[in-house]
Image (cartoon, rainbow, N blue to C red):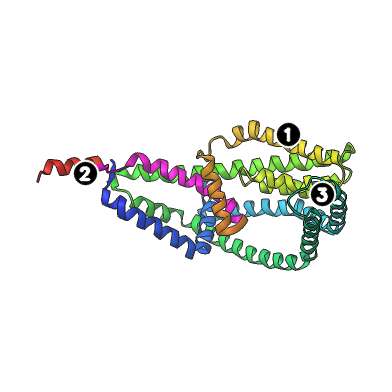
Amino acid sequence: MKIVIPRWVQMVGLPLLVLLLWFSIGIFSQVLFIFLSAMLIAFTLNPLVKRLEKMKFPRYLGVLLVFLFFISIIVTIFILVIPPAIEQLQELIDKLPFYVTEAGDKIDSWKAGLERLNLPFDVSTQGDKLVERVEEYVANLGSKAVSFSINVISALAQILLVMVISIYMLLDTRRISRGVHRLFPRRNQADADELIRSSQRAVTHWVIAQSLLSLLVGVSTGVGIWLLDVVGIWPEGSQYAIFFGAWAGLTEIMPYIGPILGATPPVVVASFSSFWAMLAVIILFIVIQQLEGNVLVPNIMGSIVGVHPLVVIFAVLAGGQLHGVAGMVMALPLVALIREVVVFIKPRVMLEKASAVEATEEDAGP
């Protein structure tokens, strides 16, 4: 059965719907973010809860066990990775004044050579301004740390709220499923089941694949930087290996721009050690990205998202605009979910063509 959307609905109703969605996102962005995050978590954990139900566990007990398992994984990651990563980040921040001074010395040494190029601006003035801005930024790190702590507390409160909502969604899955089924005619109940299964599969596959991909890239980066210290190319590499590995794994969530963001800090820090250390770090990231692009992504991610790269980039940037880094992280599973909904709707909905309307008017006569 196909639903035909009349021309007047296409010309009036659809634009109004787009405007309504646009204003709703702007007004209720915080609420939408919380509920969409909870929905994605519920989609991801529901297969495990169903599996426990098949093993004769009551649903409430299955939800409790799955959440305890989920939280234990997060706590383990925090215990093993976050404290040493924060410690290494603190060491890096403590050395920033030294790096700024060294950068200023290098800029001073380059000024004479640059001034001989007769560039259309004052090299000395621009170099001094650059050093002043960097020094001002480093001096303000203390106040930024306070602001960051406040943001972390707010984020933790949001995470707790998301977890509570996702628990309610998991406990009330049957009622939600019945609500989806009521949207379909009685003879098309199988379509409702297909929509629920495909949506859940898209989100679950993306979360599992992206988590595995981020883990492999993060571990490869940390081990690679540690090895650069072992072989003597970058003697300070092991001091920041865990932090840079965690950073690379985190930025891997953001497609296309993530690898650049992940590589920039270690390349910059290595440049203060020596040219060869910087070159070795660049080569390391090129090798990791080649392995990722040619081996890991095709075998792990496959065509889970399956949309044009420009759509993916737009979604990531839009998510960042609406809700920062968390919005960028959520963009991809939402794109995968929307793609499944579009694939489901496409063969079942047909837009009335202008030619059909014109033919009807001609047949009616004057």
Mark found first going from the N terminus, 3 or 1: 3
Mark 3 falls on what kind of element? helix
Whole-percent x and y of residue 187? 28, 44
CA distance for labels 2 and 1:
58 Å
Mark 2 falls on what kind of element? helix
Q: Main secondary structure of the magenta part?
A: helix
Name the residue type under label 3. Glu
CA distance for labels 3 and 1:
37 Å
CA distance for labels 2 and 3:
71 Å
Q: Nearer the viewer, mark 2 or mark 3?
A: 3
Nearer to us in this view, 190 or 153: 153
Name the residue type under label 1. Val
At x 70% / y 40%, what residue is drawn? 217
Q: Which residue is mark 2?
A: 357
Badge 2 crowding class, 10 Å Cα cut-off, few under 14, some 14 to 19, many 20 or more, is: few
Q: Which residue is mark 3?
A: 115
Q: Which residues are magenta?
A: 326-354
